[in-house]
Amino acid sequence: MDLLTQIVLGAAVGEKILGKKLGNKALLYGAIAGTIPDLDVYAGKLFDPITAIEIHRGFSHSILFFVLLSPLLGWLTSKIERKRDVNFKQATWFWFLGLFTHALLDAFTTWGTQLFYPLDIRLSLHSIFVIDPLYTLPFLFCLIMVMRYKRENPKRQKWNHLGLMISSGYLLLTVVVQQVVRLKFEDALAQHNIAYNRKIVKPSPFNIILWNTVVETDKGYLIGDYSFFDSQPITFDFYPKQEELIAGMESAKVIRQLQGISEGWWLITESERKLFLNDIRFGLLSTDRKNPEFSFSYELISQNNSVQAVEVTNKSGGRAKQLLSELWQRLKGN
């Protein structure tokens, strides 16, 4: 999830466990706990860009990491806050939960997290977009209300509990809604007599009203969307995988890395004599499916008997307002 959301969640955990002893300082500790797992972004600067993407949400988002780090931070916190009667066990439990809830929330997104590292399992529920105002803003409001009261005031815990209940309830709602939409897509696939291997069902940016699906078939992928305000049947557009475009390059390290990062959800496109490997889990950047522009693309550059990949960034090219307008129009129904 985005940084603000993780800070709010971490702060709420801090208030829940240490708030009665530390007051608003518990929120600060929680906010720190909520950001630590994402420090792997800075660790990634020690590696090439593709390897940095590969390790993101890996070890630093694992239970193993939390178990190793929590006692160290717990010991340090218990020493710093000994006058406030914060003991080692309580401080360790706080840090573990602060770190764990960060990774758990990330597991509900499409990118997912390697919670069980070193096992090669990425937990991705695909039920919430990385930025969802309906999750974050009510939670943030409750946290602001918490900060208004002194640590002895029972209203602090009441507001904090309310924020945790609303956010957790909304998270559960995303899973329920996802299952409803999943059945909609499955019915549409059956009506079109489409056989498929696997599929992803995920929300579009910032909401859980408009949903997308990416469906893997033997020859390529189908992409479709559904809004709860739709009046027309669900349709799908087909995109071939085009593996033949990288014939002779398949064994290159960077291509194997990108295929692993995408968990096999990739296809090749060609534009202006350039080849791109597209991670299609995140769908299309715009609604123009006849001229596909995928959210995550990597240009493949072959030279001197080696293959390199460069992530294509800033593809919106100042079109943010246009893309948001297209999203809003599609959300309102077809």
Image (cartoon, grey):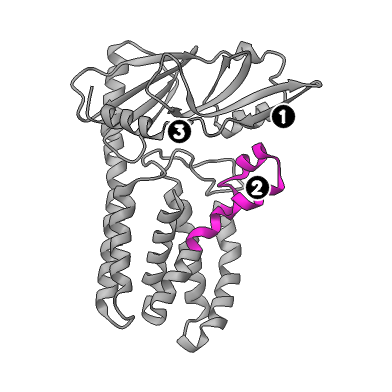
Spatial separation of the CA atoms under disc 2 and disc 1: 18 Å
Residue 44: which numbered mark, if any?
2
State left or right for residue 232 relative to residue 204. Answer: left
Task: Give percent across and percent down for residue 161.
Answer: 28, 66
Spatial separation of the CA atoms under disc 1 and disc 3: 33 Å
What residue does disc 1 label?
253
State left or right for residue 33 relative to residue 161. Answer: right
Highlighted range, magenta: 33-60
Of labels 1 and 3, earlier in sequence is 1
The quadrant in which the C terminus is found is: top left
Q: Secondary structure at mark 1?
A: helix
What residue does disc 3 label?
318
Q: Quadrant of residue 186?
A: top left
Spatial separation of the CA atoms under disc 2 and disc 3: 27 Å
Q: Secondary structure at mark 2?
A: helix
Closer mark to the observer between disc 2 and disc 1:
2
Q: Secondary structure at mark 3?
A: loop
Closer mark to the observer between disc 2 and disc 3:
3
Closer mark to the observer between disc 1 and disc 3:
3
Instruction: Please state which amino acid type lies under the numbered disc 3.
Output: Gly
Magenta stretch holds residue 41: yes
Task: Give percent across and percent down for residue 184.
Answer: 26, 25
Of labels 2 and 1, earlier in sequence is 2
Q: Main SS of the magenta segment? A: helix
Task: Give percent across and percent down for residue 249.
Answer: 71, 18
The relative height of residue 119 versus residue 247 in the rendered view (above or below) is: below
Q: Are marks 1 and 3 in contact (CB under 8 Å)?
A: no
